[in-house]
Amino acid sequence: MLASKTVVLGVTGGIAAYKAADLASKLTQAGAKVDVIMTEAATRFVTPLTFRAITGRPVVTDMFDLASEWSIEHVALADAADVVVIAPATANTIARIAGGVADDMLSCTVLATKAPVVLAPAMDVNMFENAVTQENLDRLRARGFTIIDPGYGRLASGKIGRGRLVETEKIIGTIQLVLGRKGDLAGKRIVVTAGGTQEPIDPVRVITNRSSGKMGYAIAEAARDRGATVTLVAAPASLSEPVGVEVVHVGSAVQMKEAVAKAVVQVDALIMAAAVADYQPKAPAKEKVKKTSDTLTLALVRTPDILSEVRGDFIRVGFAAESDNLVENARQKLVSKQLDLIVANDITQDVFGADTNKVILIDRSGNTEDLPLLTKRDVADRILDRTSKLLRDRSV
Ligand code: C5P
């Protein structure tokens, strides 16, 4: 997603400027070309050499530096940018940008660019809450800037409040969201499910499975990066919420069914990557079950089949985790659950919790696409390639 993209990273003069080094590093590692512009004040906190070493590219600090590749033509970076990100953005820089000032390389670039601009403010809580700063941010928001609200916590002044630069992951997630706005799924609404459901035995214990949620989360992120509006219905998983995705947390299969039924209103596609329990305890105990006998028998009943029961006019993609007769069993599920596409997952391979997956995609016409071992993110994109095509075919 970030590979081959030009990210112009503006760094302004706040104590959080040192955190921009981590951002520059992660963006560079993700394959982006990162061109850093520092304000004069920023160079008092971190040296240009830091960013030069991290990005492997020249750093602009002076609009009138004749030795700089970019300074000669003062709007060249503005034209080259796929996205401009200012992190940290001080109250001063925010005010200058809101007022259309262009007296240094960063403000000039922001004024001249047609690329989307993302601002991650960081400052003292009183400066952030000041009506002037809030008005400036509202003006910028109204002009299409993306503002990532600062976090709450301890500030350099010792005060506790809103004003901390948000985590690098959140800034990168927002950059991906913004870059994806023109993707092939722009304007589409997609519901994705992920994780393994938990079926209560008593208030303490559950029946669950080994799903890590990674496949479903990867699909949600990939769909976001291609411009879709995504709702992720997530059974418990130890993963952080993807930025820019609406996440609905659920526990049991019954709860997942309710959440999916609510989420699929006016949706274009439902992709059920969750490992939904097939059985649930018939009568979960209200109190913790005591170990009074040597054996214990649990009566189980079937869970609702979400894919079969939640109906509507949308593309339906299911998963089939199989340990034998992979293609044949998956094909039967495609038919019985009336799906448009099924992702057959060979679980004899080590897929649970892994970052890679080996799947076969099977569609209604019986076509099978045997994918090689890929990262879950790549598998997600291949599933979305097919979903995107199904959506295009449907609209003609
Ligand atoms: O029948 P099986 O569990 O193998 O089907 C797998 C597919 O059906 C997956 O996409 C899974 O998310 C979905 N499923 C469901 N409701 C269930 C069980 C599975 O929607 N109760």
Image: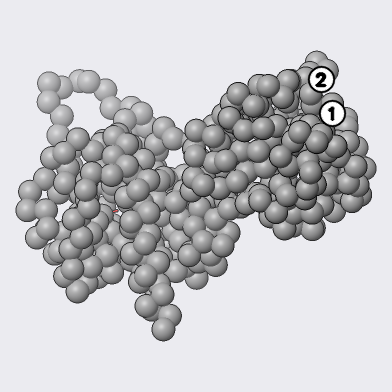
Instruction: Kindly identify the residue that appears in the image at 54 percent across and 34 percent down.
Output: 28
Q: Relative to the observer, which residue lies in front, 288 or 267? A: 267
Reading the image, the residue beneath label 1 is: 40
Q: Quadrant of residue 173?
A: top right
CA gap, disc 2 and disc 1: 7 Å
Which residue is pictured at 55% across the width and 36% down the height?
Answer: 27
Estimate the x, y position of residue 354 in percent, counting from the top left. 29, 34
Label 1 is placed on what type of residue?
Glu
Above-or-below relation of 181 to 129: below
Residue 128 image offset from top left, x and y in percent: 84, 35
> What residue is rendered at 50% in x and 53% in y?
225
Give the farthest residue toward the front.
Answer: 67
Q: Note whether 25 is above or below 220 in the view shown.
A: above
User: Which mark, by number, is residue 59?
Assistant: none
Residue 292 in the image: x percent, y percent? 20, 20
Q: Which residue is mark 2?
A: 44
Amino acid residing under circle 2: Arg
Relative to residue 258, is residue 80 drawn left or right? Answer: right
Q: Is mark 2 within 8 Å of ligand 1?
A: no
The residue nearer to you, when weighing 183 against 202, is 183
| Residue 35 x %, y % | 65, 38
Q: Specify the quadrant of the image occupied by residue 42.
A: top right
Q: Which colouring convention does the figure follow? A: one colour
Secondary structure category for the residue under label 2: helix
Q: Quadrant of ligand 1?
A: bottom left
Question: Can you say which quadrant of the picture contains the C terminus?
Answer: bottom left
Circles 2 and 1, Cβ within 8 Å, touching? The answer is yes
Query: What is the secondary structure assignment of the residue under circle 1?
Result: loop
